[in-house]
Image (cartoon, helix red, strand yellow):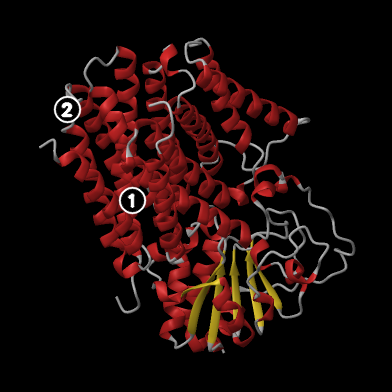
Amino acid sequence: MSALNPDYLFVFILAAFVGFQLIKKVSPLLHSPLMSLTNAIAAVVIVGAITITGEEGATPLAKTLGFIAVFCATVNLVSGFMITDRMLKMFKPRGK
Amino acid sequence: MHAFVPFAAIISSSLFILALMWMSHPSTARRGVRAGEIGMLIAIIGALVQHEVVDYNLILIAMIAGAAVGIPMALLMPMTAIPQRTAISHAFGALAVGLIGAAEYYKHAHAEYAGSFVLWALMFEMLLGFLTCTASVIAFAKLQELMGSRPVSFAGQRVVNGGVALATVVIGAMLAIDPTQTYLFPVFVGLALLFGILLVIPIGGADMPTVIALLNSYAGLAASAMGFALGNKLLIVAGALDGASGFILAVIMCKAMNRSFANVMFGGFGAVVAGAAGGKDDRVVRSASAEEAAMQLENASSVVIIPGYGMAVAQAQHKVSELYQALTKKGVDVKFAIHPVAGRMPGHMNVLLAEANVPYEQLVELDDINPELPQADVALIIGANDTINPSARDDPQSAIAGMPIIEADRAKSVFVIKRSMNAGFAGIDNPIYYNSNTQMLFGDAKDMVGTIAKELAGGGSGLH
């Protein structure tokens, strides 16, 4: 608990490399939807917020902070995914 | 059911990676969104079925309330507000991260955790989370024009910013070393929030694409740091993907302006006051009417349209699309040249033009369009200024020297739709307006483009 678990660093480095490779391939056409998609994905912090809010023995303070965090993350992930899809729907090839 | 929990994280991470992979092309991108949604659903179910979670009431209320806000926001948001929406969503995401960090800190505010890795990770997470939150709110306020988009600067700004940054880090470190000093915690949070504000107020509107990308990256890194603190690999992966994405976009934006991160963040670039170039007054500007422009466009065989932030401000994208349709019908080849920093966020112009039904094949990147411009009969500039300024290429003394530009001046003839002769954001004189092959179309972008499109659709050859 008191030191860095090297496994986490390992996962982080790999994910960052995968991220760099994938993002480099994204067409500049889609940079706006990309940004809103990654923002929606980052709302996965809701996982942490759920644990804090609902865990056994959570203090009223933790519950309050967790509640607001769940709310914020939900707003982000719901609107993030929906707006990304709305944007992408508009990108049409010729003749459509 | 509990055996599902570790696998949920693996499945979600894979789906998030697939989501980004499929974003590479418009034809598969919507599948990417589906993958992301399913990944998120699995992650949430995984979190809800954990042993530790015993009370669901608050969670469900918060989620329903969040959906009640998020769904109408997603459905009603006009596409022109996408940059603001992105900024405010970074604020929401970062606030969530910061608050989770705060709750975790109070859980760990005992002597036995002193100096532990968890605390260091939490402090780092909260620093990024809270500063990104207020920085994004300021970015939102600037984009929404609740606040002037001009940079705010004051004497000793760097000293103040440096001092606040240092104080935040020092107090954060003191808390990590001795977490029982809970009275310091609100000070730490306050300083981090203040630092976020200070970081963005000196940044002008045209630098927003870089700033938004950078804040996107910070929000991701904060989520990753939270993953380290909570020992949650899914958060580490999702945060790293988001962090990498924001970082790459910020690098692309910086390159497109030939500037460094440091220069964008601390340069106060927009503060450059319009330095009157010598001999400005004796140069001649030719102006033309919509009819004349329509006639030349009609007789052209290839036209390149160069949109800028001015098109977004005037909401002219639908009229521009009408013009595109009218010209295409007459057999004119029309392409759009998109500069990476045109607009207020990465990809801003593409979204607006796609919304107005311009096929995405016609939207061409800077490096691909420049070799074609010398063959283009007409370059039509709509609300772009600094991104087509030839002095970036020709004048080593220029404040934007070396910035890659769309070489509109190389086209056989150039039309510029502009409200007046005021300088652009950078406050730099633009020689393209005085070139002998340039004609100015003074007026509002929407009205001007609309008039030209009407001429083309209605009058046609009757003009001759």
Give the residue type that dot 1 points to: Ile
Question: Residue at (17%, 27%) from the top-left corner?
Answer: B51
Write down the chain letter for disc 2.
B
**Where residue B195 sits in the image (x, y, percent)?**
60, 29
Q: Is residue B367 above or below residue B83?
A: below
Disc 2 with disc 1 on a shared chain: no
Write down the chain letter for disc 1.
A
Identify the element where label 2 is drawn: loop
**Where residue B455 sits in the image (x, y, percent)?**
50, 77
Q: Nearer the viewer, residue B149 or B158?
A: B158
Instruction: Identify the residue position indicated by label 1 in the image.
Output: A83
Q: Nearer the viewer, residue A6 or B219?
A: A6
Instruction: Identify the residue position indicated by label 2 in the image.
Output: B51
Give the residue type that dot 2 points to: His
User: Is residue B437 toward the left or the right of residue B191 in the image?
Assistant: right
Q: Quadrant of residue B373?
A: bottom right
Dots 2, 1 in contact, CB < 8 A: no
**Where residue B305 sits in the image (x, y, percent)?**
55, 73
Mark-to-mark CA distance, 2 and 1: 34 Å
Identify the element where label 1 is drawn: helix
**Which mark lies nearer to you, 2 or 1?**
2
Q: Is residue A57 above or below residue B95?
A: above
